[in-house]
Amino acid sequence: MDRIKAIEVFVAVVDNGSLTRAAERLDVTPAMVGKVLAQLETHLGVQLIRRTTRQQSLTDAGRRFYEEGRRVLEQLSWAEASVTDLQAQGQATLRISCATTLGQCLIAPALAGFQQEHPNVRLVLELSNSHVNPVEEGFDLLLRVGALDPDLDLVAIRLGDYRMALCASPEYLAVHGTPEHVEHLVSHRCLGNLVWNRRSTWNLLIGEAPQPWPDAIFLSNDGPALRQVSLAGGGILLQPEMLVEEDIASGRLIPLLEDYLPASRPIHALYRRDRFPLAKVSSLVDYLRRTLRSTLQD
């Protein structure tokens, strides 16, 4: 019995919740998964999983073996990476997951500059605001906005701050007037992002704490689309400063109510706490810290 393969199969069964789904992930038959699992339990002399026709659950031994088995697989992955990374720096592939607007506005252009310095590094950039597990999904680097999960076992390098801007086009303000106080927004056409929360309201600083205000009249799940609506005179926009800073600088959008803007949020580069950190990851993080310092300064 290949013990490493058996551990991989067992971990896949637990992670995926069934033999069938584990088989799909491993691209083998369910019968093969069941056979390997039975061999592993025979080898260990304990039952790892209680199985019925409807569900499965870990025994105490299974729970302990799962935790240790995952560590074994991670250590093996790190050991392999530490060797192959030294030999394949020139042909390395770096997979990056980044928050959508951050990636569109800053990270994608920065990666172009990084690739000029490292022309043989193949970059794969995926933009998403969803939760990502770098170990399970195979990412080398995560770039995220906001407070960190205290239980997240990742190295976190702060790159700077993510600031918001509230603005509208001169054409809109000429027709509807310029709000001088946050309470004036109730009579304005406000643009909301569906990604933020269910009501798609803005969290403006009213008093000592952020409060949802007001309800949006136009909704979209895409920040650049909302920017276009605002540029066309469709309403007042609350979006990341990096998305609209050129519009504000050119006068296409006018900043509003700056005393009520939400507090800035930190931007972090996150990567696995490997015993042997990959040189390609360290190189990219150092590059981002250096090149984005002026843009993301406090």
Image (cartoon, grey):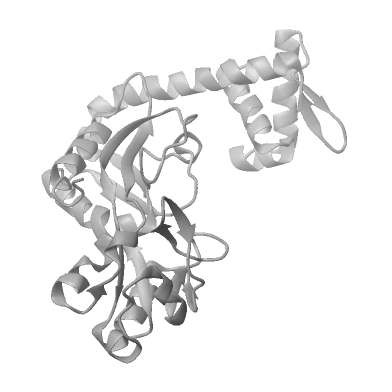
Image check: 137 left or right of 159? right
The quarter holding residue 75 reads top left
Q: In the image, what residue occupies the spot 27% across and 47% down?
A: 161
Q: Is residue 271 above or below residue 121?
A: above
Which residue extends farthest right? Answer: 53
Q: Is residue 76 above or below residue 211?
A: above
x and y percentages locating residue 93 in the rendered image = 30, 41
x and y percentages locating residue 96 in the rendered image = 35, 45
Depth order, front residue of 235/272: 235
Which part of the image, by quadrant, shows the N terminus? top right
Image check: 19 left or right of 273? right
Which part of the image, by quadrant, shows the C terminus? top left
x and y percentages locating residue 213 in the rendered image = 47, 66
Depth order, front residue of 144/44: 144
Total marks in image: 0
Which residue extends farthest top? Answer: 45
Q: In the image, what residue occupies the spot 71% across and 36% down?
A: 17
Image check: 139 left or right of 109? right
Image check: 212 left or right of 254? right
Q: In the image, what residue occupies the spot 64% across and 16% down?
A: 65
